[in-house]
Image (tube, rainbow, N blue to C red):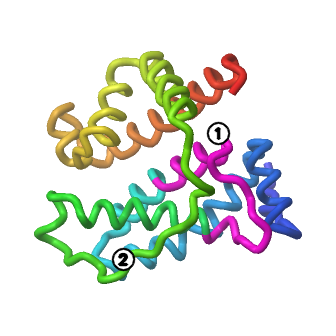
């Protein structure tokens, strides 16, 4: 099967609409456009390529969830790739602030922020949290543990590998598969609830 080239969107509005329609090729375009520069930024800011992959996946998940829930809405003159990069950048800066990396890396002197379109409503947040919790409970035990350990307890892949008696690379793959499954379950649950 021949690989088709990634689409080039004429405007950021077109790109935004494609992401809202959950077009797989829009996700691929976002990844291929943002990840190389983000990886370079992390590596030049006290991180490794593995750190870049982890922070990128967390940041992109946050961005796509905000897009899905309407917390992020397109504004003319804003580059979607820049906004996605900033979401990922925030994750890495938070990692740098965390205790387990503090001894390895100094904090950057400046932190850029992105306008998140106003203050979110408590009810909306509770609905999202509830939907995520319902989706988490649908995961198998190992996946649920990996997701909770990594994203909630913020354990490193090495620590999770030790808990599971697995290799770190295997845990990395497992975490990615589990995050993808959680995303599918979240979208299914959100559709059923009319979100």
Work out which residue is located at the far right of the displayed protein and give it: 10
Front of the two marks 2 and 1: 1
Identify the magenta region.
59-82
Labels 2 & 1 near each other (Cβ < 8 A): no
Q: Is residue 137 left or right of residue 94?
A: right
User: Label 2's element?
Assistant: helix
Residue 24 in picture, x, y percent from top left: 73, 46
Residue 36 x/y as whole percent: 54, 72
Q: CA distance from mark 2 to mark 1?
A: 31 Å
- Residue named by callout 1: 69
**Mark 2 sits on what residue?**
43
Position of 104 relative to 154 (above/below): below
Residue at image position (69%, 27%) is 195
Q: Is residue 101 above or below residue 146?
A: below
Residue 161 within the segment the image draws in magenta:
no
Q: For mark 1, give the secondary structure.
A: helix
Mark 1: give few (<14), some (14-19) or many (20+) Cα within 10 Å: some
Say whether residue 23 is left or right of residue 53: right
């Amino acid at each position: 099967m021949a690989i088709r080239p990634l689409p080039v969107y004429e405007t950021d509005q077109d790109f935004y609409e494609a992401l809202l329609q959950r077009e797989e090729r829009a996700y691929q375009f976002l990844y291929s456009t943002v990840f190389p520069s983000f990886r370079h930024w992390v590596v030049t800011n006290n991180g490794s390529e593995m750190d870049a992959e982890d922070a990128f996946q967390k940041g992109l998940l946050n961005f796509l969830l905000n897009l899905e829930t309407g917390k992020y809405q397109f504004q003319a003159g804003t580059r979607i790739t820049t906004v996605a990069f900033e979401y990922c950048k925030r994750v890495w800066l938070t990692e740098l602030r965390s205790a387990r990396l503090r001894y390895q890396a100094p904090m950057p002197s400046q932190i850029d922020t992105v306008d998140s379109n106003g203050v979110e409503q408590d009810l909306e947040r509770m609905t999202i949290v509830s939907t995520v919790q319902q989706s988490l409970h649908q995961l198998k035990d190992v996946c649920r543990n990996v997701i909770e350990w990594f994203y909630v307890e913020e354990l490193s892949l090495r620590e999770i590998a030790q808990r599971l008696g697995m290799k770190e690379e295997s845990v990395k793959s497992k975490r990615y598969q589990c995050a993808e499954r959680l995303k599918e379950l979240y979208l299914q649950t959100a559709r059923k609830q009319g979100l």
